Amino acid sequence: MTTSTAPRPTRPAPSSTHVRAALFALALGGFTIGTTEFATMGLLPQIGADLGVGDPVVGYAITAYAVGVVVGAPLLTVAAARMSRQRLLLWLMGFYTLANVLSAAAPDVTTLVAGRFLAGLPHGAFFGVGAAVGAAVAGPGRRGHAVAMMMTGLTVANVVGVPVSTAVGQQLGWRVAFLVVGVLGAATLLGVWRSVPHAGAVDSSKRQELAALRNRPLWISFAAGAIGFGGLFAVYTYVAPTAMRVTGLSESAVPWVLAVFGVGMTVGTLIGGRLADHDVLGTVIGGFVATAVALVVFGLVAASPVAAVAALFGVAVTSQILGLAMQTRLMDLSPGAQSLGAALCHSALNVGNASGAFFGGLAIAAGWGYVAPTWAGLVLTIAGLGTVLAFGRQTVPHGGGHSA
């Protein structure tokens, strides 16, 4: 496929201390991204009130971020295929930090939408490259664990970062919540610079990355995730107004609801990592089924505070089991370009983010109430499951993992 190169000297395996430090730096990046990505959803009412628009209109900013991820993940990963992995991670996080400062300064909803689109561009590439680097550093047989550790940063953001930034936004203004991301971004830059070794780089080229795109099983799994992930985001995008207007909780209770959701996401990520190391495709299918069941439960009990919060916890757990397994599946299906495969998972997640926010907003705007997005999400989840069952069991020719 590519021209031969002289063999490189063997590098010593990183020590366990270095592995932990590298994974922590990558997890901190996940925490930074997760804090600002999901904080927008928790601050939906405050942003709308400040900019003079309704919840569905603010939802367009969430959609714009998701579109940025979808566009940026494959393009940036392929364009920077030959760049040092550490340097690429630094560039991506630096751009992400600046784009969130722009969002904080937005004078109107149009500028906010533009800022969120720019912030979304490096998101998927950072997770894709970081997942491949983490898997390489952790070593054989620990791939699912390494990806889970990085993704734990994203989910812990929903336990700590999102509730805290939501509370800060409620008290000091939503713009301050975005500025906090600047501090987190600076900390991530320092951590990656000091802790992520060049030994974790993934040898690749534009040709090799592009070759991975000519892969029917990869795109089928991508489509399944892109459709099915809408179930999570149809609920989570509007979780703050739903908790206040349907469940009957106060505004001050919203950060606690988000914290419970974040705990569920963290639990789901850790479970998903272990399950994916044993059976990737089985975990994908089981994740779809479990998410569909959790959405039905939430739709039925949304008006009951205790039951609704418990059901949201279930949605968080099941959706993250699905997300972790789907990322590992896409890495399996792109064995020569695992950064791209992992990045495409985040593109798929954010197609689901965009569709969930969009269809949920349409249901609310149509006057069907704040429970209606849950049923729209259920349809998307079932469609994703159907895609996997009908078309998504293929593997790549000449190997590509143990996922089938």
Image (cartoon, rainbow, N blue to C red):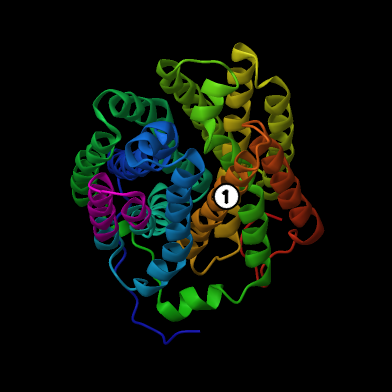
- Using the rendered image of the protein, determine whether residue 333 is visible from the camera's viewpoint: yes
Q: Position of residue 213 (x, y in %)?
A: 56, 73
Left or right: 188, with 323 as reference point: left
To which residue does mark 1 refer?
Answer: 358
Q: Is residue 112 magenta?
A: yes
* In the rendered image, the vertical position of residue 293 relative to residue 9, given as above or below: above
Q: Is residue 257 magenta?
A: no
In the picture, the quarter occupied by the C terminus is bottom right
* Quadrant of the image occupied by residue 287: top right
Q: Position of residue 83 (x, y in %)?
A: 29, 70
Q: Position of residue 219 (x, y in %)?
A: 64, 66
* In the rendered image, the vertical position of residue 19 relative to residue 306, given as above or below: below
Q: Counting other residues with Cα less than 10 Å from the Cα at mark 1, is it few (<14), some (14-19), or many (20 or more)?
A: many
Magenta span of residues: 91-114
- Residue found at the far right of this picture: 390
* In the rendered image, the vertical position of residue 67 relative to residue 187, given as above or below: below
Left or right: 200, with 383 as reference point: left
* Quadrant of the image occupied by residue 42: top left
Return the residue nearer the eye: 217 or 23. 217
Query: Residue at the location (34% across, 54% down)?
Result: 119
Left or right: 18, with 288 as reference point: left
Return the residue nearer the eye: 57 or 167. 57
Magenta region's main secondary structure?
helix
Q: Position of residue 175 (x, y in %)?
A: 26, 38
Return the residue nearer the eye: 343 or 334. 343
* Amino acid tagged 1: Phe
Return the residue nearer the eye: 230 or 9. 230
Query: Residue at the location (59% across, 30% down)?
Result: 317
